[in-house]
Amino acid sequence: MLIRKKILSHAVLILLLISAFPLIVHIGSENVSATDPEVWNQTSGALASTDANWLDGTKPIAGDNIIFNATSTASCTWDLALALGTFSMNTGYSGTITQAASFSVTGYAQAAGTFTGSGVFVMSLSGDFIKTGGTITTDVLNVTFTGVAKNYTSNAAQALHTVIFSGSTTINTNVGIAHLAISAASSVTIATGKYISYLAYNAPTYSNLGTIYGPGALSMEFYNADQTMDLGTTTADLEIYLHNAAVAGHTLTLSAPLATPSVINIYSNSAAQTMTLDLSASNYALSATDITIGTRGIINGRASTITSSGNWDSSAGTFTAGTSTLVMSGATKTIKTANSNGAPYNFQESGTTTTSSSVNITHSLTVDTGKTLTVGAGKTVDLNCSNGGTYSNLGTIAGSGTMEYSFSTADKTLAFGVVNAPVRVRAISTATANRTMTLSSDRVLGSTLLVNSDHASNTMTIDARAVYFGAVGAITEGTRGDILYATFAFVSSPGYGGGVQTMHSYTYETNLSTTASPGQVYTFTSNATWLSWDSIDLAVYGTPDSVFGGHWYYVNISVADGMLSTYQNYTVLVVPVETLQDYIPLLMALLFGFGLLIAGLKFRELWILAGPVWIICGLTIFIPYGVVFLLVSVGLGIVLMFKGVSPYL
C-alpha cells in the first residue's frame, strides 16, 4: 500500500513539471534577452519592431545590446524608442539602418554598413561613439552626448546635422556640425590637430553655455548666410572662414565679448568674396593670443578694444580699425600690417613687440611703463600727430627702424619719452600750413633725428626752446625742416647794456630756469672778492669795499648744457658812496676859483692863481662826472694861467 502511494505522488510531480515547462522556457527566454545581444535577422519587412526580424524571434526591449552583422545584411528601419545598451554595426553587415524613432544607447560602434539618421529623431549616447568603418549619411544624424569623459572617434570626417553635448566629450576626429549646442556645465575637448567645423549655413544654430577646450580648433565655416552669435567660452583655436563656393561675402557679428587664450584666424577660401568678423555696434571686446587676418579676411574693429597677447598679422587681409584700440600685451611678439588697409587707430604697447612691417597709427600711441615697442630694421612706425590723438611713451621705443611723427592739419605739443630708434619728424605732402611740434620736456634721443617737410612749400619745425634737447646721433635739418633750440640770455638789475658798469651795490640775474634744463652748468669768475654767486637764484650779489678814487673789477659768467653755451663778460668800476659833506672842499675850491676869476677882471695877475685851482677841480670832478668836466676845467685853467702871465711877457 505504501509503495503504491509513493508511485502515485511521483507521477503527479512529473505531470506538474511537464505542464509548467512552457512557462519555464518563456521565463528563461525573457531573462536571456535582457543580457544577451539582440542580433538582426530580417525575415519579414524592415521594421525593428517586428519580432520575426530578430534571431531569437523577439524584438529588442530596454537594456538590450543590439548587433547588426553578417547574420542578415538586409536594411533596417529603426522604429523602437528604447533605452538600449550598446548599438553595434559589425563587419559583414552591408545594409542601411534608417532612424525612425528617438532612442538612447550606452555606446555606439560602427565597422560596416550605413546609418542614416534624422533631423527630427535623436540618438542619445552616454558612452563612446566609435566608428571604424561603414558610412554615416551626411548631415542627417542628430546626436546628444550625455556621458562623462567619453569619446567621439571616426575613421573619417563626418558632417552631422545636430550635436548636443550634455556631459564631457573628447573629439578625436574632424567633425562638421550644422547645429551645435553645449549645455551649461558641459564641455567639449578637441584633440590635437582635430577640429569641430560649425557649418554656418542652411539656418544653423550655435549655443555654447559650457566650455570648448583645445588644443584642437573650432572652425566656423560660412557659405550662404550671415550670423550673429555669442561664441561663449573657448580655449580652442578659432578659425572663421568663407567656403570656397560662396557667391557672396559673409559676416559673423559678435553678440557678446570674445576672449580666448588661443589663436584667431579670419580668412576666405573664395577667390573673390570676403569673410568679416564684426565686433558689432555694441563694441564688444576681442582678445586672443595670435590674431591673423588672412586672405580676404576682415576685422571690423568699431570702437572696441582688441587685445593680442601673441602675434598680430593683418598683412594679407583688412583691418577696418574704426576708432578701436589695438593692445599688444605679450612678451617678445610681432606685429605685421598692410599699411594701406591695416592701420590701427589707437595702438597700445603693453608688452614687448617688434614690428615686422611698417605700421601706420592714425590717432594715438601709448607705450606703457616698462614696456618696449621695437621698430624693425628697414621699417617705420608712423604716428599721425594731427588727428587729435594722444602720445604717451612711458616705456621705450627702440630698434633700428624709424619712428616717424607726421603732421598735416594741426600742430602738437608732446614729450618724446625714451626713443632710441632713429626719429623723423615731418610735414606730409598734403600739410595744410607750416607745422610745428613743440617739445614739453627735456630729452636726448638715442639715435639720429631728421626734421623735414614733404610739402612743396610748407615747413616742419621742432620748437625746443623751452627744454634741453639733443640726440646721440646726427641731427639733420632737411628740406624745409627747422629746429628752434633754447637760447641763453641774461638780464640784470639794474639793467645791463654791456660794457662798463659803475657799481655801488649790485645784483646780477639771469632769465634761465634751473628746472627747465637740469643739464645747465654755470661758471662765475671775478677778481672782486666781495662778489658772490647764488646758484639757486642764478644771481651775482655783493656790496663793494669803500675805495676812494675808484677801483676796476671784471665779472665773467658762462652757461653750458653740453650742446650750447654762451657767456657775459663785463667790467665794474666801484666808486665810494659820497655825501654832501664829501663835496664841501670841492665846492669851496670852486668858489675860490670863481672869486679869483672875477677878481682877475681887475687884477689880471690873479688869473695865474685861478688856473691851477680850476685844473685841480677838473681832475677831481672827472672821477664821478666824466671827461667833459675834465676838459672844460683843465682847458679853462690853462687859459687863465696864460692870461695871468701874459702881462709880464
Image: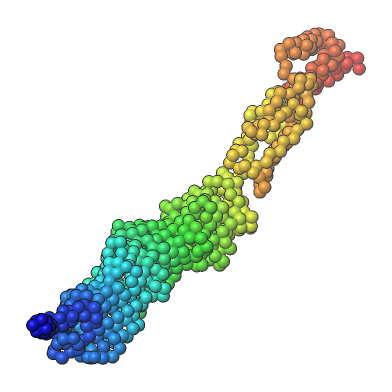
**Count of residue discs:** 0
Q: Where on the picture, by quarter, is residue 645? A: top right
Classify residue 276 as left or right of residue 442. left
Does any portion of residue 183 appear in the rendered image? yes
Does any portion of residue 19 appear in the rendered image? no
477 versus 275 height, above or below: above
User: Considering the image in quadrants, where does the C terminus appear?
Assistant: top right
At horizontal 79% and vertical 17% (from top left) the residue drawn is 617
Classify residue 122 as left or right of residue 487. left
Of residues 143 and 297, which is closer to you in this image? 143
Q: Where on the picture, by quarter, is residue 238? A: bottom left
Q: Position of residue 355 (x, y in %)?
A: 51, 64
Of residues 466 and 552, which is closer to you in this image? 466
Q: Position of residue 370 (x, y in %)?
A: 53, 52
Of residues 362 and 318, which is closer to you in this image? 318
At horizontal 75% and vertical 13% (from top left) the residue drawn is 582
User: Considering the image in quadrants, where does the N terminus appear?
Assistant: bottom left
Q: Position of residue 442 (x, y in %)?
A: 58, 46
